[in-house]
Image: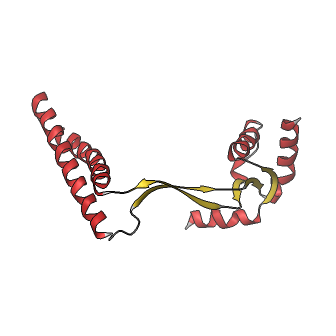
Amino acid sequence: MARLAQVTSSRNREVVAGFDNYADAERAVDSLSDKGFPVEHTTISGVGLRMVEDVLGRLTYPKAAGLGALNGLWIGLLFGVFLALFTTNAVAWFAVILWALLWGAVVGAVAALIWHALSGGRRDFLSASQLIADRYEVLVDPAHAERARELLQTSQS
């Protein structure tokens, strides 16, 4: 609930600078911080947001099984290391981890195959999504806005 209050309070903030990319907005806030400005009164806001999804390829049963096995390996490693902590010698330690990796890969592949089969051909492609803004604005509480503008102007000179 406290986080929600922080988000809604940023609507009362004033724009003190605008940038074409996030890195420049981040550098501006870092510059304010370096000059002792109370950056807890600052927000970086993306304006003109859009979601872009790049299609990476077709999701086939072999790809689904392979990706599921890779995910299962990570889960198997996690469980294997945890269970290996309770072993008494190095051979048992490695055996438990290898066994967990094997079962993690098998369970992951089977689960992914079942999930892919149940999708019925809907969304049978791989993709990567990202949220992109047209520009970024640095916003500051009204009580600190003028000081922020001054500090940012001196850093641009």
Question: In this picture, is 17 found above or below 97?
Answer: below
In the picture, the quarter occupied by the C terminus is top right
Q: Is residue 52 left or right of residue 15?
A: left
Q: Is residue 49 above or below residue 63?
A: below
Tell me, yes or no, if residue 89 can be seen here: no
The N terminus - image quarter: bottom right
Q: Choose between 122 and 3: the one closer to the eye.
A: 122
Residue at the image position 76 percent from the left and 43 percent from the top: 37
The location of residue 18, given as percent across then percent down, is 79, 51
Measured from the top left, where is residue 90 in percent x and y? 13, 28
Furthest-top residue in view?
Answer: 90
Q: Residue at x 66, y 61 (%)?
A: 49
Percent across and percent down for residue 124 are 38, 63
Residue 76 image position (x, y, % from top left): 23, 46
Nearest to the observer: residue 1 or residue 117: 117
Comparing 144 with 77, the one in front is: 77
Q: Is 113 or 100 nearer to us in this picture? A: 113
Q: How many marks?
A: 0
